[in-house]
Every structure is written in C-alpha cells, then in structure tokens.
Amino acid sequence: MAGRNNSKKNALNQQKFIANPAMMPQVFSKRLRSCPLSEEGAPVVDYKNVALLKQYISERGKILPRRISAVSSKKQRELAKAIKNARVLSLLSFINN
Amino acid sequence: MALYETTIILRPELAVADVEKAAESFSGIISKNKGKVIKKEIWGLKELAYKINKNRKGYYVHFGIEGTGETVSELRRKLKINEDVIRDLTINVKAFNDNAKDFGEE
C-alpha cells in the first residue's frame, strides 16, 4: 500500500532529523545501543542457558532479528546456532502457537 | 584430541536407577573408544518443549568428552541402536562452559 507516499514521507522526515537531531524519535535512538552480549561480564552464549536464549526469541518462538535486539553480528551467529541446538534438544520449541 | 559435549534424552518410563545404569554404560562406551569422560551430569526428568515420539518428558544426561572423531562416531552409532534414547546431540566445543547453570530455571 502507498509505498511511494511512505518513502517520500520518510525522506522528508530524515531531512528534518538531520536539521534538528532533537526531533529524532525514540525508535531511532534505540539502534545506537551497543551489543548486550559483547559487554564485559556478559553471559556466554550457550545452548544450555535457556533463560538467556528466551530473551532473544519472539513470542512465536522465532529468533529475533539484530535490528531489534542490537546484538553484534558475531554474537548473533553464535546465538542463532545456540537457539537451533536448544531446539533439537527440546529445550526450546520450534513453533509457539 | 578435541572436546565434545553430548546430551542424551532417555525415555521417561525408565526408573532413576536405570537412567544411572544407562549413563554408566555410555561412559563405558566413551572410555573404550579412546575417549575420556571429563564431565557427567544427570539433569533429571524434564518437560520437553514439544513431543518426541509421543513423549512429553524425558531424562536428560549430559557428558563432557575429550576424544577423537572415532569416539564420537562410535558413541552416536550405539545411541542410535539404543531404544531408550529418544534424542541425542553432540557438539564440538572449544571449552566447557559450566556457568550456564541457569538451565532449567524457567
């Protein structure tokens, strides 16, 4: 729907933000967060640590994209593997309905 | 020699003594095939996230192994034959992570 209109609107909005950073909505500032799994003292990504993995899956049981969780690409690769291993062991489900 | 972690899920109908006996026999298979059991944990009867062969629960047994590819292939061959085993997973690890104790606390 109205894709052309939206992109025009986005371009306009972006111009506004460049001119006045204070107008930038909260959604954008969220992206600047650093990776929560790369900090010092962050937990090791492990398929056995179900409590940690559950923070990075959606309600449906899907793996959350990096743009939402702000995880670094290296850690995201580890995380995806760990979640998939945990699924094989039935620690996490493949689908949640 | 490489490090491996093996997790085995056993049928829930087994008695606790049987689970321990099975774990013993798996250790035997590992040590007979150029392997060394570094870590042996019995996580106990746990609810499965989804049904496996119509089972809702299963006994989890976890091993830390130092061995070669032969050790792993022989262990996996034996696990496939064993009818008490409903699922098994072996992965190669750089180091054992014992801090993931959050496991099971949901």
Image (tube, coloured by chain):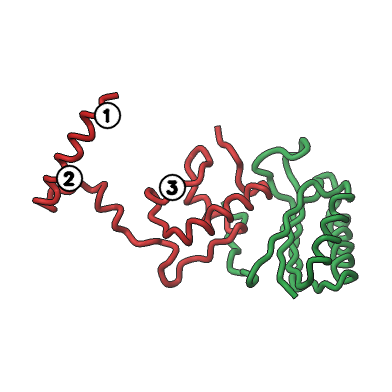
Residue in view at x 76 percent, y 67 percent:
B40
Chain in green on the image: B
Whole-angstrom CA distance, mark 3 to mark 2, is 23 Å
Against B70, residue A91 (above or below) is above
User: Which chain, by letter, is red?
Assistant: A
- Identity of the amino acid at label 2? Gln
Q: Nearer the viewer, residue A25 or A6?
A: A6
Residue position for label 2: A14
Mark 3 highlights which residue? A65
Report x, y in % for residue B90.
Answer: 73, 59
A15 horizontally vs B81: left or right: left
- The Cα–Cα distance between marks 3 and 1, rounded to whole angstroms, is 23 Å
Instruction: Report the label total.
Output: 3
The local secondary structure at tag 1 comes to: helix
Locate residue A48: give its quadrant.
bottom right
Nearest the viewer among B92 and A11 is A11
Residue on which disc 1 sits:
A3
Q: What residue do we see at 25% from left, 49% from top?
A: A28
- Reading the chain from its start, which is encountered first: label 3 or label 2? 2
Q: For the residue marked with disc 3, what is the amino acid?
A: Pro
| Residue projecting furthest to the top | A1
Q: Quadrant of the C terminus of chain A?
A: top right
Subunit bearing disc 2: A
Residue A2 in the image: above or below residue A38: above
In front: label 3 or label 1: 1
Picture quadrant of residue A5: top left
Q: Is residue A31 left or right of residue A14?
A: right
